[in-house]
Image: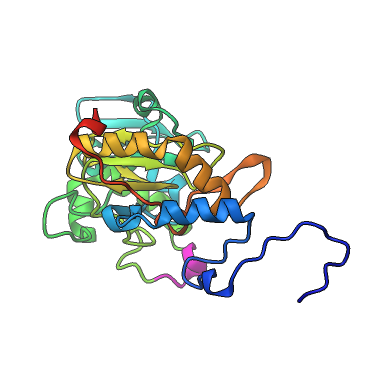
Amino acid sequence: MLPRNGIRLFSYIPYKDLSSQKGWLLNDNRIIENIKRIEEVENSLGKAYKIRNGIATLSNDTYIFKPIGETQDCFLFENKGGKKYEIEKVICRDIIKPNILKYEYEIESVKEKLIYPYTNGISPFSLMNEKHLKSNFPKAYKYLLDNKEELQKRDKGNGNYGAWYAFGRTQALKNNGFKLLFPYMAKKPHFVFTDQKDMLIYCGYAIFNESQEELKILKCILESKVFEYYMANTSKPYSAGYFSYAKNYVKNFGIYELSEQDKY
């Protein structure tokens, strides 16, 4: 037996209960038992739903902007240096940052535009070639050209993206559908539903499903005291009462199968 070294309260945790896959849960035995009950449900969040990261341009200040006006064909915006640009609407997609969201009514006010030099949702997915980009979207091309030097600094100048104007990573570019948006970290759980299928995300996560109803029910479950308790006792803590909401910390949460009566 290990020496107590003056410590009076101990929790004895059997070695067999320590998981190298889920990570060690070192806590009061009562809390450990509660967490086990939550995770022993047959269906977990990670098994039942697709949890996805946002896109990674590696130069968000270049590609993402908030319009200050618009014409029939273009969005108007001003960069950090005060220079104004016009960008063709048809090369832009809606994008949002889950890290700053708490409620559905905030979506329209914080939604931004993304310059998207890809096939814009048309299958098969591909990067536009430079000639096509220049001839069909001259205003967007000129803007990107003004930022070419900065874009070429990504990955310390060693990036191989297919073209200098491509995003730094291709992750999440084909994600589409109804979704629940949630942040990298939070004090309390906030999951925001959106039916804007084509809207992309950055700096945060999304849970995808084909059923709006199912996502709205899931939102209620994930904003419950049970999920808050689960995260407070299993997730990585940060300062000021924040906890990580990374996929590895949320994926093992058990999702009970609800009866039709329980759903309403």
In front of the other: 228 or 151: 228
In front of the other: 183 or 61: 183
Q: Residue furthest right?
A: 6
Residue lying at 88% horizontally and 62% vertically, measured from the top left: 6
- Residue 140's image quarter? top left
Magenta residues (range): 153-159
Q: Is residue 228 left or right of residue 126?
A: right
Residue lying at 77% horizontally and 56% vertically, measured from the top left: 9
Q: Is residue 47 left or right of residue 26?
A: left
Q: Is residue 123 left or right of residue 70?
A: left
- Residue 38: image location, x then y, percent: 43, 51
Q: Residue furthest left?
A: 123
Is residue 43 part of the magenta span, yes or no? no
- Residue 256: image location, x then y, percent: 31, 46
The answer to whether residue 99 is seen in the rendering is: no
- Residue 34: image location, x then y, percent: 50, 50
Residue lying at 54% horizontally and 54% vertically, measured from the top left: 234
- Residue 197's image quarter? top left
| Image quadrant in which the C terminus is located | top left
In front of the other: 22 or 161: 22
Q: How many marks?
A: 0
Q: Is residue 43 left or right of residue 132?
A: right
- Residue 238: image location, x then y, percent: 64, 48
The answer to whether residue 133 is seen in the rendering is: yes
Residue lying at 42% horizontally and 35% vertically, measured from the top left: 223
